[in-house]
Amino acid sequence: MTVTKICCIGAGYVGGPTMAVIAKQNPNIKVTIVDINQARIDAWNDPDVSKLPIYEPGLAEIVEETRGKNLFFSTEIDKTIDEAEMIFISVNTPTKTYGKGKGMAADLKYVELCARNIAKVAKTDKIVVEKSTLPVRTAQAIKSILDNTGSGVKFDILSNPEFLAEGTAIQDLLNPDRVLIGGESEAAIESLANVYGSWVPQSQILRTNVWSSELSKLTANAFLAQRISSINAISELCEKTEANVDEVAKAIGMDSRIGPKFLKSSVGFGGSCFQKDILNLVYIARSYNLQAVADYWEQVIILNDHQKRRFADNLISTLYNTVSGKKIGFLGWAFKKDTNDTRESAAIYVADHLLNEQANISVFDPKVSNEKMQSDLNYLNTRSEEENSKLIQATDSPYEALKDAHAVAIMTEWDEFKTYDWTRIYNDMKKPAFIFDGRNILDKAEMEKIGFEYASIGQ
């Protein structure tokens, strides 16, 4: 089948950038992204592309180039499903907050609702592509729902997991390490391979069975997160032995069997995928009674939580065992630089820990609003919304955020933080002035020369 119309259900961090790049590279295909959230669709359609709901370097330019030509954003879900030959399911699959598997299993209710809606609306044969990160054998459930509609429509189910890193998503899409397509129908697989083949060499398009494809996504994220937890475990040992974790990471990263990526020690990993996917892996392993496998992967999460707690505890103990009533300035709230995504950001949990000790927190992040920070903290249900809004505030200026602060906590590795006037910041802070560099981005000797008491990870 030659695909001329694509529908993507879900206008989020995966659907938006992926479809924008597919539209750019396939001007002959009409790509429509649909979502029930009217405000989100309005933001995607905003004439000012700096106001798109997602910030990714390079995304605004591609949307500006393709929107209204062959890239469209709409809330007309049924109409778009009906017209499309290929439908991507790219909806949220959060960790369950209720019932069996609470806190670990993926909540598939949005995926199932999509499948039921496609089954209800479709009058012609469709290729349905899983783009959301899903547990193994989800395709089977989707297929079961679609095949039992009684409408006589033929559905082919493909798994096409995304391997995007936020902050570099557009580059990852334009120059992918690999594109993975899992499925049973060779014709359906080749239809999707042809869409990607307009810019990705066929040698980099892997064709597998659907279960290998689903499991590959969870495993890739688990391995990457494991590397971060591994170097963070060594960082604590470095602090006790006077080794330097950056030097250790460089030394082991030069081993071609290990390589240098994801060996940057920090306050801990965040983002929408790593924790969720590992918990999913743990849940699947436990459901098959593979307890040793589950325990092994769960330790990656335990270590990550420990690293965040350890960072906050170190800050408190250094500030004479109390932060009550003290102003702590946060630089960064996003889980990493070059994105406005805050999901599972270390900043949320460190802030929550410090707020329990009655600290006052002032935050500057170049891409995250005060409303988003409040919503992240309120989601934890640790204290009332009123208390959160009183104890933590975002500012429009880094200098304002750090004025009269007892300590600076660097939570995100934004490049601009290195270029600030740190002498001015020092002069405006309470003395002694402390820096807790959770991303190891500043020069220790330079900061100490200015007068700061400087603490970093693993040094």
Image: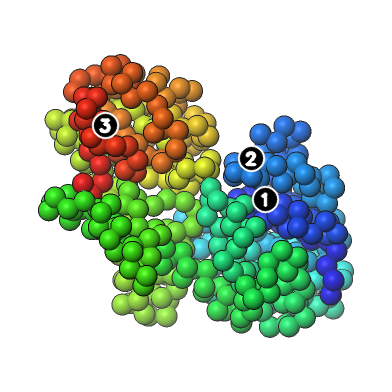
Task: Determine whether the residue tagged by mark 1 lies in a helix, strand or loop.
Answer: helix
Q: Which residue is mark 1?
A: 16
Q: Is residue 243 left or right of residue 406?
A: left
Q: Which residue is mark 2?
A: 53
Which is in the foreground here, disc 1 or disc 3? 3
Sequence-wise first label, 1 or 2: 1
> Residue visible at 85% across and 47% down?
69
Q: Residues within 10 Å of mark 3 (few under 14, many from 20)?
A: few
Above or below for 419 versus 31: above
Q: What scheme was used to colour the molecule?
A: rainbow
Q: Which one is nearer the viewer's eye here, 253 or 163?
A: 253
Task: Determine whether the residue tagged by mark 2 lies in a helix, strand or loop.
Answer: loop
Check disc 2 and give the amino acid type: Pro
Q: Residue 89 location, x and y as percent?
A: 68, 62
Q: Which residue is mark 3?
A: 446
Q: Residues within 10 Å of mark 1 (few under 14, many from 20)?
A: many
Q: Residues within 10 Å of mark 2 (few under 14, many from 20)?
A: many
- Real-space Cα separation, disc 1 to disc 2, in angstroms: 9 Å
> Residue visible at 32% across and 37% down?
442
Check disc 1 and give the amino acid type: Gly
Task: Determine whether the residue tagged by mark 3 lies in a helix, strand or loop.
Answer: helix
Sequence-wise first label, 3 or 2: 2
Sequence-wise first label, 1 or 3: 1
Q: Where is residue 231, by image quadrant? A: bottom left
